[in-house]
C-alpha cells in the first residue's frame, strides 16, 4: 500500500523539531489559543481554533472540517451547498509549524497556515493532497515548475489598493474617509492613525513595508511590502487583509477591498509584479522586531533575495526583457482572456473595466511603462500584470500565471513588439488588438476554453471555481437592481 501524502507531510525531516520549537514559543509568549487557517476558493480565510494545550496532538493528527469549507460553506441560488454536499467526507488540515505567528492585536492568540488533505479513511486517494486547497496547489505547482525549468523561481510583488470607508448609524458604507486626491500628503495624513496601525501590525507579522500613498479614490490607500517567492507573497497579502479588517474594527471603519464601490473614481486594482529567478538565498528581515525574541517563527521574516533575474535585458535594448522574459510575456499575452477570470473574479470587477478614463487595462497587449495595456514592463527585470483587482485570490493568480509562463517557455511564444503608443491611439491607427472579456460571464467562458490555464486549477479546483463563479454570475443576472427600476419603471406608456 502506497504511503499517504499526509503521512509524508507530518513525518517530513525536521518537522518534529519545529513542532517542539513552536511549543517553546507558545510557552515563552504566553499563547493560549491557536487559529488554524486555510484559504477558500475565493480567498476567504477559513479554519478552526483550538486551545494551545493541544498543539502537539493537532500538529500530528490535524483537524477535520467539511469539504464545503473550501467553498466558503455557502449555498447556490437554488439552496444547494456549493462544491460538496452534506454527504461528502471531511478534509484534514495539518498546521505548518513554520507559519506560527502571534497576533499583535491579541497576544494570547497565534495563527498557523495549514495544508489540506483528503481524509485518511476515504476509499479513493486516502490521505492525498486536497486539490480544493488553493494554497497547497500553488506550493506544489511552483515546485513542479522549478523542477521542469532548471530551478526557475517565480517571485511576486503585489500592489493592493483598498478603500477606508465610513459607516453610517446602521453600519452601512457612508463614503470614503478622505477626499479622492492622488498622492496628496494632506489626505494621506488624514488617515495616518489608520495606516500607522496597519504598518505596526504588518511589521510585527513579518511584512517588510516599503512605501505607501493616497490613491485617487475616496479613502483609497496603497501600502506595499518587499516582493518574495510567489506563495510567501500570497500569504503576506492574505495576512495584510486580516490586519486591515482588524484595524477597521478598531476605528469603526470598513476596510473595503471591493474593486469598484464608486463609479467616477479609480477602482482598487492589485497589480502583480512578477519575475523569474535562478538561485538566491533566504535573508531574514526582522522588520523592527528583536531577532532573538521574534513574535513568530523565523521563517515568517525570511525573504528570497539575490540570484539571476532572467527577465533582465540581455541585449542592447535596455527596454527589452531577456529571452526567458519575452517567452513568459508571450504566454501571458496568449492567455490573457482566460487569466482575466481569475484576476477579475467578481461581477463588480468589470465595473473597473467599463468606467473609462481611469487607466484600467481592457486590451490584451503589452508595452514598456504603458498603462493602457494589460501587461507592461514596469521596470527593467519585472513585468506588471494589470488585469487584476484587490478581490483576487493570490494563490489562484500565482498558479495560473505559472501555467501561462510555462506554456510561453515550452512553445517559445513571441509576444510581438511592445506597444509604445496609447493603445486607443494605436487602434485608431489601424492596429488589431484583442479586447479582454468585459463581464464575469464572458471571462468564465474564456476560461472554460483554455486548457493551459485550467492546468493552474488542478484536480477539483477548476470545477469548484467555475461552479462558484457561475452561480455568482447567475445571481447577478437574476437580480433586479436600482438601475433597472430607475431606467424602466416609468418607461411606458
Image (cartoon, rainbow, N blue to C red):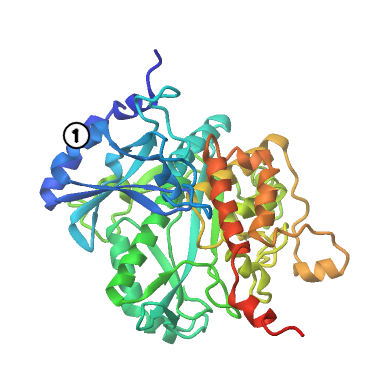
Q: Position of residue 352 (x, y in %)?
A: 61, 69
Hey, which residue is sitting farthest front in the picture? 493
Q: Residue at x 53, y 69 (%)?
A: 268
Hey, which residue is sitting farthest top in the picture? 1
Q: Which image quadrant is residue 453 in?
A: top right
Q: Is residue 181 above or below residue 318?
A: below
Q: Is residue 347 above or below residue 71?
A: below
Q: Quadrant of the C terminus?
A: bottom right
Q: Secondary structure at mark 1?
A: helix
Q: Quadrant of the N terminus?
A: top left
> Does 190 sit left or right of 83 as displayed?
left
> Does 385 sit left or right of 225 as displayed?
right
Hey, which residue is sitting farthest right in the picture? 430
Mark 1, residue position: 57
> Does 332 sit left or right of 205 as displayed?
right
* Residue 412 appears in the rendering: yes
Q: Position of residue 157 (x, y in %)?
A: 49, 56
Q: Residue at x 16, y 40 (%)?
A: 54
**Residue 118 versus residue 98: which sits nearer the camera?**
118
Q: Residue at x 33, y 63 (%)?
A: 243
Q: Residue at x 49, y 53 (%)?
A: 393
Q: Position of residue 33 (x, y in %)?
A: 18, 50
Q: Is residue 119 above or below residue 78?
A: above
Q: Residues within 10 Å of mark 1 (few under 14, many from 20)?
A: few
Q: Position of residue 49 (x, y in %)?
A: 24, 48
* Residue 379 appears in the rendering: no
**Residue 405 versus residue 360: which sits nearer the camera?**
360
Total numbered labels placed on residues in the image: 1
Amino acid at each position: 500500500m502506497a504511503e499517504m501524502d499526509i503521512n509524508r507531510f507530518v513525518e517530513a525531516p525536521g518537522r518534529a523539531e519545529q513542532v517542539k520549537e513552536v511549543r517553546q514559543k507558545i510557552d515563552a509568549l504566553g499563547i493560549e489559543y491557536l487559529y488554524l487557517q486555510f484559504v477558500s476558493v475565493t480567498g476567504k480565510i477559513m479554519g478552526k481554533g483550538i486551545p494551545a494545550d493541544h498543539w502537539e496532538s493537532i500538529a500530528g493528527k490535524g483537524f477535520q472540517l467539511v469539504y464545503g469549507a473550501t467553498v466558503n460553506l455557502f449555498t447556490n441560488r437554488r439552496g444547494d451547498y456549493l462544491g460538496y454536499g452534506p454527504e461528502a467526507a471531511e478534509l484534514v488540515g495539518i498546521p505548518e509549524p513554520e507559519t506560527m505567528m502571534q497576533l499583535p492585536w491579541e497576544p494570547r492568540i497565534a495563527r498557523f497556515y495549514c495544508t489540506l488533505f483528503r481524509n485518511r479513511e476515504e476509499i479513493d486517494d486516502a490521505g492525498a493532497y486536497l486539490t480544493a486547497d488553493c494554497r497547497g496547489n500553488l506550493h506544489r505547482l511552483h515546485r513542479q515548475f522549478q523542477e521542469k525549468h532548471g530551478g526557475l523561481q517565480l517571485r511576486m510583488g503585489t500592489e493592493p489598493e483598498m478603500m477606508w470607508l465610513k459607516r453610517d448609524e446602521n453600519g452601512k458604507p457612508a463614503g470614503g474617509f478622505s477626499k479622492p486626491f492622488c498622492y496628496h500628503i494632506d489626505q494621506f495624513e488624514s488617515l495616518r492613525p489608520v495606516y500607522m496601525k496597519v504598518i505596526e501590525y504588518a511589521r510585527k507579522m513579518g511584512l517588510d513595508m516599503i512605501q505607501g500613498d493616497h490613491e485617487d479614490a475616496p479613502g483609497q490607500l496603497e501600502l506595499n511590502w518587499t516582493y518574495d517567492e510567489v506563495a510567501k507573497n500570497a500569504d503576506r497579502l492574505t495576512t495584510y487583509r486580516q490586519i486591515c479588517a482588524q484595524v477597521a474594527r478598531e476605528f469603526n471603519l470598513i476596510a473595503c477591498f471591493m474593486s469598484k464601490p464608486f463609479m467616477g473614481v479609480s477602482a482598487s486594482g492589485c497589480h502583480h509584479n512578477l519575475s523569474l529567478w535562478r538561485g538566491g538565498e533566504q535573508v531574514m528581515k526582522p522588520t523592527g522586531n528583536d531577532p532573538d525574541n521574534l513574535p513568530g517563527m523565523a521563517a515568517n521574516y525570511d525573504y528570497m533575495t539575490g540570484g539571476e533575474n532572467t527577465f533582465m535585458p540581455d541585449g542592447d535594448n535596455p527596454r527589452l526583457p531577456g529571452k526567458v522574459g519575452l517567452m513568459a510575456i508571450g504566454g501571458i499575452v496568449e492567455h490573457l482572456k482566460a487569466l482575466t477570470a481569475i484576476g477579475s473574479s467578481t461581477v463588480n470587477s468589470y465595473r473597473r473595466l467599463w468606467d473609462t478614463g481611469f487607466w484600467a487595462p481592457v486590451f490584451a497587449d503589452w508595452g514598456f511603462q504603458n498603462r493602457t495595456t494589460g501587461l507592461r514592463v514596469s521596470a527593467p527585470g519585472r513585468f506588471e500584470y494589470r488585469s487584476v483587482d484587490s478581490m483576487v485570490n493570490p494563490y489562484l493568480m500565482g498558479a495560473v500565471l505559472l501555467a501561462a509562463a510555462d506554456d510561453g517557455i515550452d512553445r517559445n511564444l513571441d509576444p510581438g513588439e511592445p506597444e509604445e503608443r496609447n493603445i486607443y491611439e494605436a487602434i485608431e491607427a489601424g492596429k488589431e488588438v484583442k479586447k479582454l472579456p468585459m463581464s464575469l460571464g464572458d471571462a468564465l467562458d474564456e476560461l472554460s476554453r483554455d486548457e493551459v490555464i485550467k492546468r493552474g486549477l488542478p484536480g477539483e479546483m477548476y470545477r469548484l471555481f467555475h461552479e462558484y463563479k457561475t452561480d455568482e454570475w447567475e445571481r447577478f443576472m437574476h437580480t433586479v437592481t436600482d438601475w433597472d427600476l430607475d431606467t424602466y419603471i416609468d418607461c411606458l406608456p
